[in-house]
Amino acid sequence: MPEMRFLEALRDALRLEMERDPNVYIIGEDVGIYGNVFGVTKGLIDLFGPDRVRDTPITESAIVGAAVGSAACGLRPVAEVMYVDFIGVALDQLYNQAAKMRYMFGGKIKIPLVLRSACGAGRGGAAQHSQSLESWFMHVPGLKVVMPSTPADAKGLLISSIRDDNPVVFLEHKLLYPTKGEVPQGEYTIPLGLAAIKRPGKDVTVVATARMVHYALNAAEKLSSEGIQIELVDPRTLSPLDEETILESVRKTHRLVIVHEEVKFAGSGAEIAAMVAEKAIDYLDAPILRVAAPFSPVPFSPSLENEFIPSEEKIINAVRTAMRG
């Protein structure tokens, strides 16, 4: 398999789906001539023209509103909100319209809309360009929430999201864009709602998302020298959540550590922890632990931002604590 960067895998998925289905189009700020602030859509306007790669003014409410309306009329828009922090001005279009319309029309309408957005800290973007807000979208019935961690997953999950007849919020950690990995050529899909075991193990289940998957893999390698074998589960889709894969792992290891870059309070890890407590508490030999960001805006200062982001050391310490029971 060829090696691709994360952003190239996303671009390949978009290209393939636009070639396959003329109803697929891209809409967003700087997605056309500029090719997206991170380069994801670079060159697509040359292949498909400005009607299918549509640059917009700086108005997220119009981007998402136009996508919702066109999806309701039979198109398959891939709308981009440059940073997830900017989604607030378009929340009504997303959670009151896109998420509700199929239900309110008794299933007679489809809303095949993908909303792509960049999330996460680590680039000095400060409090308004660095947030991880996935739990917001998880809370809304009618929205699917996808968060890939590798180039191969990014491509397969984006193709599945574009083909889905329901609105999908597709979140991309901005520091994953340059990362490389093997990616299958041509079309392939990864089912939404299917987790992946990124590393098998027997001692502690670690559930991690997006960039934290890579931190957890590094932590697992260091802990293996101590004889501790982590089983790393990447949900890939937060809604619907693959509960059974997580539960099966916990039944095997009897310990659970959850790692994400969101703030800990009311983050996605809280839902995962509650689910395991409700369905597998008799299997646990230690309290469920969460490694996450503090309840704070993302700092601009590099030293404070580094402290804000969960670290390999914090993951290692949590796993050691879980092993002690």
Image (spheres, rainbow, N blue to C red):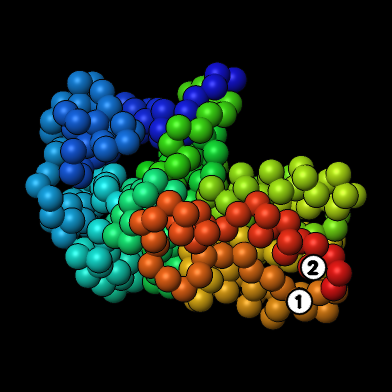
On the rendered image, what quadrant is the C terminus found in? bottom right
Q: Which of 63 and 58 is in front in this view?
A: 58
Callout 1 crowding tier (Cα within 10 Å): few <14, some 14–19, many ≥20: some
Residue type pointed to by label 2: Ala
Q: Nearer the viewer, residue 87 or 260?
A: 260
- Secondary structure at badge 2 equals helix
The residue that appears at 71% across and 48% down in the rendered structure is: 219
Whether the residues at callouts 1 and 2 have beta carbons within 8 Å, the answer is: yes
Callout 2 crowding tier (Cα within 10 Å): few <14, some 14–19, many ≥20: many
On the rendered image, what quadrant is the N terminus found in? top right
Horizontal and vertical percent position of residue 186: 48, 23
Count the marks. Answer: 2
Residue type pointed to by label 1: Pro
The residue where tag 1 is placed is: 287
Horizontal and vertical percent position of residue 184: 55, 26
Q: Quarter of the image holding residue 206? A: bottom right
The residue where tag 2 is placed is: 322
Determine whether, in the image, residue 146 is placed left or right of residue 255.
left
The residue that appears at 12% across and 50% down in the rendered structure is: 58
Q: Quarter of the image holding residue 84? A: bottom left
Instruction: Compute the Cα span from label 1 to label 2.
Output: 7 Å
- Secondary structure at badge 1 equals loop
